[in-house]
Amino acid sequence: MSLLDEILKANATFCAAPPVDYTQEDHAAKLPRKQVAIITCMDTRLVNFLEPALGIGRGEAKVIKTAGNSVTGVFDGTIRSLMVCIYELGVKEVLVIGHHECGMAKTTSESLTKAMLSRGVPKEAIHMIAKELREWADEFHHPEQNVSDAVEQIRMNPLIPKDVPVHGLIFHPRTGKLDIIEDGYSSIK
């Protein structure tokens, strides 16, 4: 049985007897009830752990996941997602949440380039993104600093309103402990 077959079988079982009625308003909200967007890492250890540790339930927040909770440009995917969250979905605050033991701290443009070449990605394609790849992968060394950098990039972005507090936090993927790195309220006073 393939992975896709396993997923489809699990889905059929789930749909036959869902644990809750997801059609009810408290489970089906498109607008985040807590009016918050969370930018966090795609690390598998955060799945079904980060949101409960924050007291966030289904329908309460918009969650944007990227490798290393990175913001890489004025109009990158993270910023585009935030724009929809703020301008169309009622988000009033942003949490950038990095985590200890992040794998991006060990990732480099060189290691990614070698892996891409070994999988058949043409050198010309890698050359097209080499500068951006170095700026992204080689600048991430410390999760706490990356959170501060992402918060600053969002705060300074001309497309994000200045009245939106952008907080920076760090999460421990084994204990669930959350620490403040940047208090977004102090930057909008």
Image (cartoon, grey):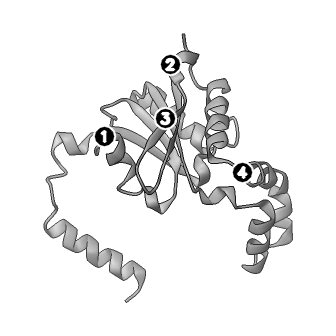
| Three-letter amino acid code at the position of disc 4 | His
Quadrant in the picture for residue 115:
bottom right
Residue 88: quadrant of the picture = top left
State which tag comes first along the sequence, 1 or 2: 1
| Residue 176 appearing in the image | yes
What is the CA distance from the residue labelled 2 to the residue labelled 4?
Answer: 27 Å
Left or right of 86, for residue 70: right
In the image, what residue type sits under mark 3?
A: Leu
Work out whether mark 1 precedes mark 3 in sequence or the reverse, and give the earlier one: 1
Mark 2, mark 4: which one is toward the viewer? 4
Disc 3: which residue: 95
- Give 144 or 189, whichever is nearer the viewer: 144
Q: Residues within 10 Å of mark 2 (few under 14, many from 20)?
A: few
Q: Earlier in the sequence, mark 4 or mark 1?
A: 1
The amino acid type, in three-letter code, at marker 1 is: Gly
Q: Earlier in the sequence, mark 2 or mark 4?
A: 4
Could you tell me which secondary element the residue under label 2 belongs to?
Answer: helix
Earlier-in-chain disc, 3 versus 2? 3
Residue under label 1, please give it.
Answer: 55
Q: Is residue 85 above or below residue 158?
A: below
Q: Residue 91's spot in the image, x, y percent?
A: 42, 28
Q: Position of residue 98 (x, y in %)?
A: 55, 45
Cα distance between the residues tagged 1 and 2? 20 Å
Q: Regarding mark 3 in the picture, which secondary structure is present there?
A: strand
- Which residue lies under the disc numbered 4? 141
For the residues labelled 3 and 2, say whether their Cβ atoms are less than 8 Å apart.
Answer: no
Q: Residues within 10 Å of mark 3 (few under 14, many from 20)?
A: many
Q: Which corner quadrant of the image does residue 33 belong to?
A: top left
